[in-house]
Image (tube, grey):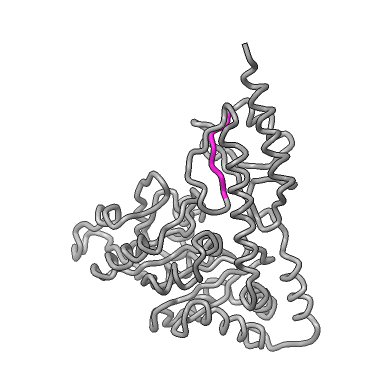
Amino acid sequence: MKGFASDNYAGAHPEVLAAITAANAEHAVAYGADPWTARAKELLREHFGEQASPYLVFNGSAANVLSLRALCRPWESVVCAAGAHVNVDEGGAPERIAGCKLQAVPTLDGKLTPELVASQLHRIGDEHVVQPRVVSVSQSTELGTRYSTYELAALAHFAHERGLLLHVDGARLANAAAALDVPLRAITTDVGADAVSFGGTKNGLLLGEAVVFLRPGLDEGFAYLRKQTLQLASKGRFLGAQFVALLEGDLWRRSAAHANVMAARLAAALVDVPGVRITQPVQANVVFAVIARSATDELQRDWHFYTWDDETGEVRLMCAWDTTPEEVDAFADAVAQACRAASPPR
């Protein structure tokens, strides 16, 4: 199964599994009233600021949906990129469960700008029209691009001036922070974000994400929403223990940085291969490229990766914390051979 399909395909990091095993030694109070969860919340506040209010949940869809459910009232909407995970890969859960309309904006690189958000701010105060409340950005984006601190600060400033909130879908926040060589708070709290869905599963956890509210008061009633939305873990210590392993040292950064380096290595190996065209800047742990369809068909007999766009032949090649240089080099060689076979010399 080793390949480049998704960082979700990777197993749990050995340090995370060791933390789970250690937490399994004896009984502990249920529903998050345990020492591991308390320590995890303390560490999340260390990374995001003492004012932060963190909550642990099972998965990324829940983290996003619960964030939006907490920030929006039933008549309010979320402005996001058309390709954002909340729009195309949550199975309609933001609308069905959070009950908020998504205003999806087409982008070239997966990133919103103040100008793109402004295009969605019409008829404010008109009771016949849904009212924008949240701007949701993915960091890094679904296309592997990342926002700079300046870009995020500009979005937060624009949103706040208009009474809006900024939510960061941080399923791969660690990859963005590692690539920018900044702390987690530098691309969330310090730029003015209001809430973040902090990903763990894609960065070596067995399961588990965190919803972190970055401004006091935004989490009012959230404990009830989490329970009502079936995301309160009875044996919460096993979520807490994983976040302790991830955040107490530099595991979050080590794992993310390694995945980023492997993506850069893969892009460098493919960029000069005839028949391959890199389509997006490689700024995190993924490479997007157009490969001849016949070559892709041949490659997918032995390697796991997704075709992102059937019309153009664009594929997504995702690296993970456990991707090895040998796997990258072997795959790049396979791509070169498949492309040569697809376009033999005349």
x and y, in percent, of residue 167 in the image: 41, 66
Counting labels gives 0
Q: As rendered, which of 240 and 123 lies closer to the eye?
A: 240
Magenta stretch encompasses residue 288: yes
Is residue 342 located in the magenta-colored stretch of the structure? no
Q: Image height check: is 325 above or below 27?
A: above
Residue 266 lies, in percent from the top left, at 62, 44
Residue drawn at the location 48% of the way across and 43% of the way down: 280
> Residue shown at 64%/46% (left/top)?
5
Tell me where residue 16 sits by quadrant: bottom right
Give left or right: position of 134 versus 229. Answer: left
Q: Looking at the image, which residue sits at the far right?
A: 25
**Direction from residue 127 to residue 3 in the image, left or right:** right
What secondary structure prevails in the magenta region? strand
Residue closest to the eye, 235 or 38: 38
Across and down, in percent, residue 94 comes to: 45, 61
Q: Is residue 211 above or below residue 117?
A: below
Q: Residue drawn at (71%, 48%), measured in percent from left and top?
A: 325
Where residue 91 sits: x, y (%)?
A: 51, 53
- Which region is colored magenta? 286-291
* Quarter where residue 36 is shown: bottom right
188 vs 302, nearest the viewer: 188
Q: Work out which quarter of the rendered image holds the C terminus and state it.
A: top right
Q: Is residue 234 visible?
A: no
